[in-house]
Image: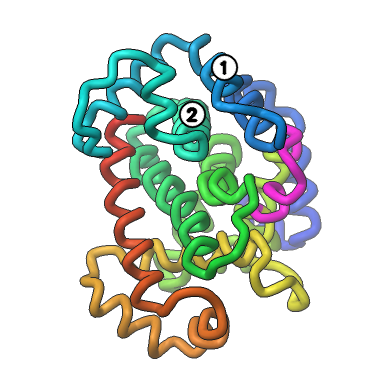
Amino acid sequence: MSIQEIGNKAQIITDIRSKLKDVRDLPKLPTLAIEIQKIINDSNSSMSDLVAVVDKDMVLAGRILRIANSAFYGIPRKIDNLKTAMIVLGMSKIARLVTSVSVMGLFEDDAEFDMRQFWLHGAICGDFTVGLYRGLKLQCPNGAHISGLLHDIGKIILYKYLPEYYTQCKDYMKANDVRMVDAEIKLLGIDHGHIGSWLTRKWNVPDEISEAVAQHHIRSSDTPSYSLSVMVDWADRLSYIVLNRSKESVIELLESDQKWIEWQSEKGYSTERIVDILLELHKRSSQLIDFLR
């Protein structure tokens, strides 16, 4: 049955919920990611707690050692044990690495869906969300990176479990030269953000993460300007703005964007300094994805 034949968006949303409820192989958030989130959300936790968790997974521990000894971090001496590697990289970087590794293994590669590109975009958005808090000199919540990493997870859910809806939205997007989210709202009455949040709520992640995933495109007009959902939205937009552009052209685009000027002008560093932060993170994310995938 096509979307045009269904017609009623409320019925479509009910149909989507019903189909997802019946799916038996919806992925579960890896235990490792859950443990890491608990550690970083616990003010009494330490690097030793993190090492103890990572040490349970030999493959992951090996990857961390390889990353620590790579040109990626440029550490001048060889590191031959996990604890030293983790101390050198730091708790926040390790937490992001471990979460990324565990989450990126949730779905198998697919010839029709570019998983590498999908997770590269997610990794960049995760880093950009953290980078924007830094650039705006705001306190960064613990859920910032994983919110950016998972913000588009609803797209995979549509593709894997609701292929008829995904295909029609994708065709509409191409035919009308609009964003995927616009096609989803037009045809389904719901977007991939809210669909993705249904999954993250099943995972029992903190509410702020599920809300950021749900609202990174669509949210109420009274949402605070620097809430996590807004930061993820800007991270998402900026990931496309910096793509294949020089630093100068990125700065020029942002400084001519009234929304950016109003949002950023009274906070943190200059646009140029924020762009420097983001471009460095973009470079690191692109290199890191080859270690993780």
| Magenta-span inclusion, residue 212 | yes
Q: What span is in magenta?
A: 201-213
Residue 239 visible in the picture: yes
Tags 1 and 2 touching, CB below 8 Å: yes
Magenta segment: does it hold 233? Answer: no
Q: Position of residue 253 (x, y in %)?
A: 34, 82
Relative to 153, 196 lies left or right: right
Task: Kindly identify the residue that appears in the image at 76 percent across and 61 percent down.
Answer: 8
* Mark 2 residue type: Val
Residue nearest the viewer, comparing 255 with 199: 255
Question: Is 145 situated above or below 292?
Answer: below
Name the residue that disc number 1 marks: 53
Asked which colour scheme the image uses, the reply is rainbow
In the rendered structure, find residue 241 and report the number of the disc placed on it: none
Image quarter for residue 115?
A: top left
In the image: residue 289, left or right of residue 135: left
Q: Which residue is mark 2?
A: 98
